Amino acid sequence: MENRQLLLTVVTPEKTVLADKPVDFAVVPAVGGELGVLPGHAPEVVQLKEGMLRYSSGKEKEVFSVLSGFAEICADRVLVLAEAAELAKEIDEERARQALRKAKDAIAVKGEQVDIDEAQAALKRAAVRLKIAEFKQRHRP
């Protein structure tokens, strides 16, 4: 098999975001740092943190925001089981900025009515979405 590829699947509790997409490589945001995966990779399961998942297939490149979960890596397959995942093209930069501000304000209040864990999760989610939106702006064709 001359032109080896991986099959990339990204699943969240709500939906399958990407199903068996043939890709040349994938980069996942693992807890220990970004992990690049090429065909023939050793089998491994990694914990994901919030960050950018990206892949390339020929001239096509795509970026997702991913919020925690796990990735199962096999020689010819990457299965990402994420709490949440969103395509870069679906992220509105202004909405991401507003969500970031709102999350920061909620943490600053520190009142009894504020769930600090929930506010911190919202802050991480908003920060990743904003990072992806800014990445998308810098890498426009």
Image (cartoon, rainbow, N blue to C red):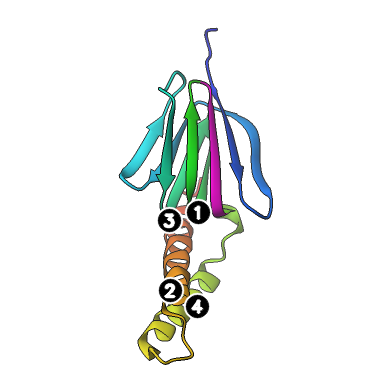
Label 3 vs label 4: CA separation?
A: 19 Å
Horizontal placement of 131 versus 89: left or right? left
Q: Which residues are magenta?
A: 76-84
Q: Nearer the viewer, mark 3 or mark 1?
A: 3
Q: Find residue 18 and report its horizontal and vertical position in percent.
A: 64, 41
Precedes in sequence: disc 3 or disc 4? 3
Q: Secondary structure at mark 2?
A: helix
Measure the C-alpha gap from mark 2 to mark 1.
Answer: 20 Å
Amino acid marked by disc 4: Gln
Name the one closer to the observer, 43 or 53: 43
Report which quarter residue 6 is drawn in: top right
Judge from the rendering whether residue 130 lies leftward or rightward of residue 80; answer left or right: left
Circle 1 residue: 65
Q: Amino acid at mark 2?
A: Asp
Identify which residue is drawn at 64% across, 53% down.
Answer: 13
Residue corresponding to mark 3: 50
Residue 19: image tag: none
**How many other residues sit within 10 Å of disc 3, few (<14), some (14-19) or many (≥20)?**
many
Question: What is the crowding at mark 1: few (fewer than 14 residues within 10 Å), some, or many (at least 20)?
Answer: many
Residue 21, quarter of the rendered image = top right
Q: Position of residue 23 (x, y in %)?
A: 54, 28
Task: Say which amino acid is labelled 1.
Answer: Ser
| View extreme (front): residue | 112
Per the image, label 1 sits on a secondary structure element best described as strand
What residue is at 68 percent from the left and 55 percent from the top? 14
